[in-house]
Image (spheres, rainbow, N blue to C red):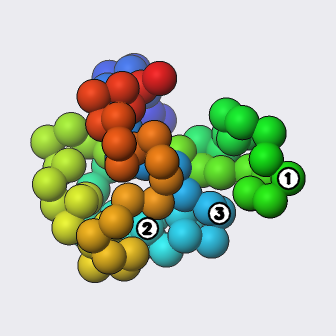
């Protein structure tokens, strides 16, 4: 049984990923013991050339630095989407 405390836990948005990339990241977060939340969402803008579904990954705020290192290890130092790379202060938008 899950406690209410774990269900209402706050998570810090990391970025949005294509499903295949999100799976790689989530596997690494799990193996590193980092609490995360992954939600499938529709992209903000309708773009026929882009993915039709993306996965928004959020992590335990106390583990953001470690999660960022995992992201860099998997995908390099660039962030996977426009919003997170240029408007970090608006990550919840």
The residue shown at (25%, 59%) is 67
Q: Quadrant of residue 32?
A: bottom left
Circle 3 sits on which residue?
Answer: 19
Categorize mark 3 by other alpha carbons within 10 Å: few (<14), some (14-19), many (20+).
Answer: some
Mark 1 and mark 2 lie on one chain; the one further toward the N terminus is 2
Disc 1 to disc 2, C-alpha distance: 25 Å
x, y percent for residue 41: 68, 39
x, y percent for residue 18: 62, 62
Circle 1 sits on which residue?
Answer: 48
Q: Residue 17 versus residue 83: which sits nearer the camera?
A: 83
Circle 2 sits on which residue?
Answer: 25
Image position of 36 with respect to 32: above or below? above
Question: Which SS class for mark 2?
Answer: helix
Q: Quadrant of residue 72?
A: bottom left
Q: Residue 61 versus residue 73: which sits nearer the camera?
A: 73
Question: Which SS class for mark 3?
Answer: helix
Categorize mark 1 by other alpha carbons within 10 Å: few (<14), some (14-19), many (20+).
Answer: few
Q: Residue 50 versus residue 61: which sits nearer the camera?
A: 50
Q: Residue 37 versus residue 86: which sits nearer the camera?
A: 86
Determine the residue located farthest toward the right in the rendered image: 48
The residue shown at (42%, 25%) is 92
């Amino acid at each position: 049984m899950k406690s209410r405390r774990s269900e209402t836990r706050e998570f810090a948005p990391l970025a949005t990923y294509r499903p295949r990339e999100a799976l790689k990241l989530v596997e690494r977060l799990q193996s590193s013991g980092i609490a995360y939340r992954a939600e499938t969402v529709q992209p903000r803008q309708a773009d026929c050339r882009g993915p039709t579904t993306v996965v928004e990954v959020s992590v335990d705020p106390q583990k953001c630095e470690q999660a960022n290192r995992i992201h860099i290890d998997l995908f390099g130092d660039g962030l996977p989407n426009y919003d997170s790379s240029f408007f970090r202060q608006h990550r919840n938008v």
